[in-house]
Image (cartoon, rainbow, N blue to C red):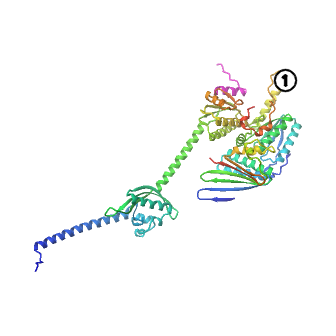
Amino acid sequence: MAQVQTSEEQSKKEYFPINSLVDVVRARRRGLEIAQEMGFPLAEATKIAVVISELGRNIERYVGQGAITVTTHLGREKYIMIVAQDQGSGIPDVDRVLVGGYSTSGGLGLGVSGSKRLVDKFDIQSIAGVGTTVKAIKLLR
Amino acid sequence: MRDFEPSELGETMETFTVVQKLEDLLLVSVPRDLTDSDVLRLRQRVLRDIRRYDSRWVLLDFSLVDICDSFFGRFIHSTAQMAKLMGADVIVAGLQDAVIETMVELGMTLPNIHAVLDLDDALALSREYKTREQVQAEDPLESPDSSRVEGESTDWDAFADSPLSDWTEV
Amino acid sequence: MKDTRKTKSQLIEELTGARSRVAELEALTERALLDQRLLRVFLENASDKVYFKDAESRFIKVGRSTAVMFGQSDPAAVVGKTDFDFFTEEHARPAFEDEQEVMRTGQPIFKEEKETWIDGQETWASTVKVPLRDEEGKIVGTFGVSRNITEQKRVEAESAQLQVEVLNAQQRAIQDLSTPVIPVLEGVIVMPLIGSIDTLRARDIMRRLLQGIREQRAKVVILDITGVPIVDSGVATNMNKAIQAARLKGARTIVVGISDAVAETIVDLGLDWSGIETLSDLQTGLRVALQGMGFRLVRSSE
């Protein structure tokens, strides 16, 4: 676990390779723990775990392998950041996916658009033939 | 007695009886984490047992589930669809507070499915319906109380994708 | 040949004059020595840090307290040094600038400042710096007195922290009061909402609602919004979510207390509340809830 510490701020990162559903389960369980340790109330920590689950499942189902990193930031601004990356063929129409209701095999749309509602900041970068990176940030209030 | 083998999740799946008959209910103790293949096998088992026991209800007990994503939502949805086709209604019980908060945020409101606090209430519900249906059977002239959760057929697929504000309460 | 001899009276005059001059000088010297002594006593004993600096902010003379503060047993050892020899740039630079300003404007400077030491320590001081003038009144340096207020600052900070904690506790208490869950008969709970509902409060309401249903095993929730002045689409959406959540927890929700204004807003905003059970007031809501559970209210005749 990499630890970066400056005099005022502290960031910790945990890395989860995603190659199977067992990996997704492990990542979301640990995500739930990390969020609670940070001080998120259970309901909010659950939302974070769900986002990890949704993004992880998408990687597993559509690409087969990728990674999720969970970063906790405890400086003046406190937040948790989830980054899901894969090197798949990319999402052709990111905007439609974000709006919701778009689903190629009965799942992608709800997973991603739903996740957006559970966090404070959400971003998808997808390049055809190169891969996809999804970032989600939830602030600790 | 173990009648549902653990899946590839192994370490996270506990070995206990997942599907049991309880009066006219088929009690399904939904495991904490499910893979796609778990879902397939579980559904097959449920449908087989509805037929075997002629169950009036499928009771999905979610007390073990603490992380419920859209995958779980689709599991409930598809199980309910299939059970309905076989004449059984679905009751969901034991949803944890944190899980409910997330489901509601995701727009997963499970319309057309009964929801109760716990197994006691599920039993109470089934007995209440049984009494009502008995009364009806004895006196068919009584104005029919909908014994089954009827209504116009719902666009189940739309449930997965449409926003919360489109839904009206059953 | 000139007569260089002075007359007797002339000599006496000169002598008298010389004597009184000497007496004058002796008196002046005594005064000066007294002043010097007083200054020495002062510098030796003053508990506040006293210091004299030249135009380049080098110490010319310091009191014992100052020397001790700088870790020197002899005040003379401080002479010729500057703040930069003892403090980090963070404090030494603005201190220097202050002295330059005092000398430029001829005006004193009073302030509370944080002293950052080279060894890493931090202290707080209440400081006054005034211009130092020579006999002609020309400004040649500065004179400063500073008092250690580190302890006061610490107490101030603690008190401020305590205030914040008290405020938070008060806020929580108000929240508790404004979002109670009141159990009434047999599995019916009433949740009166009072005040405005923002996103954070909505989350709290949802949490308490689910907790209340769980603890009371409630089958009916009466949500009384008489006390909610503004229902905009945000509030309405949050209420919808709460109602959906209650349902998933096994309870049916009846909303009561919708005012004319709120009713207008709901319709004007195009919100679909047709699926939400609403009744006029709490009394009606209670009656309907209990009846729905199979109870009948009968007045016992005595």
The residue under the point 51% across, 51% down is C158
Q: Which quadrant is home to the C terminus of chain B?
A: top right
Residue B90 drawn above or below residue A16: above
Under tag 1, what secondary structure? helix
Q: In the displayed structure, does residue C191 sit left or right of residue B153?
A: left
Q: Which quadrant holds residue B164?
A: top right
Rendered location of residue C163, percent (x, y): 52, 46
Q: Name the kind of residue labelled 1 in the image.
A: Glu
In-front residue for pair B100/C94: C94
Which stretch appears magenta? C282-302
Rendered location of residue C95, percent (x, y): 45, 60
Residue A66 drawn above or below residue B144: below
Q: Does the magenta stretch include residue C294?
A: yes
In-front residue for pair B75/C296: B75
Residue C163 drawn above or below residue C188: below
Q: Is residue A24 visible?
A: yes
The residue under the point 80% across, 47% down is B34
